[in-house]
Image (cartoon, rainbow, N blue to C red):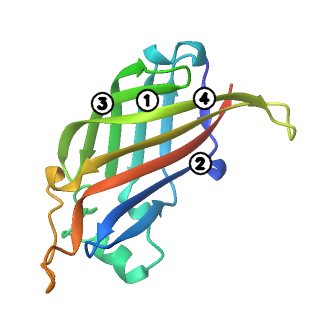
Amino acid sequence: MSKLTLDAVHSSIDFQIKHMMVAKAKGSFTYFDVEFDGELDDIENATVTVTIPVAAIDTGNEQRDGHLKSEDFFDPDNHPNLIFKSRKIEKISEEEYRITGDFTMKGVTNEETFIVEYNGTSKSPMDGSTVAGFDMEGKINREAYNVTFNAPLETGGVLLGSDVKFTGNFEFTVN
């Protein structure tokens, strides 16, 4: 079995949510871990675990980050990590896979599905190692995880949307 080691420098997880009904608030996680157990030529039988510390949230605004790290949102004192554990990976095209698993946030676990594109492998000119790349996208409904903070707007609607869209880019060293 190949061991894949996440190259955190060349990987990212970003998110966005509708803000004030007309725009998007965006952010990322400055650190996280992705464990891939399996073979690149048999991705459907691999398992994937993603662990994202809530403390790693970064929206580029210290005050907003502090609010997101409060009980109104992620409550990291009681729920320090977002965790995704795959249960099923289905090939849907030559490069694309549908990955379904258990997503846990703020003590609540629900089944979620993300689309993952396998970008193949390449040889690093720096050290000769083999690297593999993946892209990911999907969305969750934050309210299904008891992350329900919101405020009504004077013009109608609410401050924050329910859906949180995720995108990720991951580079691994193949050992």
- Among the 4 quarters of the image, the one containing residue 50: top left
Which of pointers 1 and 4 lies earlier in the amino acid sequence? 4
Q: Residue at x 17, y 51 (%)?
A: 145
The percent coordinates of residue 108 (x first, y second) are 17, 46
Q: Is residue 34 above or below residue 167?
A: above
Quadrant of the frame with the C terminus = top right
* Label 2 element class: loop
Q: Earlier in the sequence, mark 3 or mark 4?
A: 4
Query: Which residue shows up at 19% across the image and 69% down it?
Result: 71
Say whether residue 57 is visible. no
Question: Where does residue 10 sit, x and y in percent of width and height?
Answer: 65, 49
Give the residue drawn at x 43%, y 43%.
137
| Residue 107 visible in this rendered orientation of the protein | yes
Residue 69 disc label: none
Q: What label sits on residue 11 in the rendered view?
A: 2
Vertical order, 31 against 150 (above or below):
above
Camera-side mark, 3 or 4? 3
Q: What is the crowding at mark 3: few (fewer than 14 residues within 10 Å), some, or many (at least 20)?
A: many
Task: Tell me: 94 left or right of 165.
Answer: right
Residue sitting nearer the eye, 162 or 170: 162
Q: Which mark is residue 101?
A: 3
Q: Which residue is mark 4?
A: 4
Sequence-first tag of 1 and 2: 2
Task: Tell me if label 1 and label 3 are in contact, CB under 8 Å.
Answer: yes
Mark 4: which amino acid?
A: Leu
Spatial CA distance of label 1 from label 4 is: 11 Å
Closer to the chain start, of discs 2 and 4, is: 4
Q: CA distance from mark 1 to mark 3?
A: 9 Å
Amino acid tagged 1: Val
Q: Which residue is mark 1?
A: 48
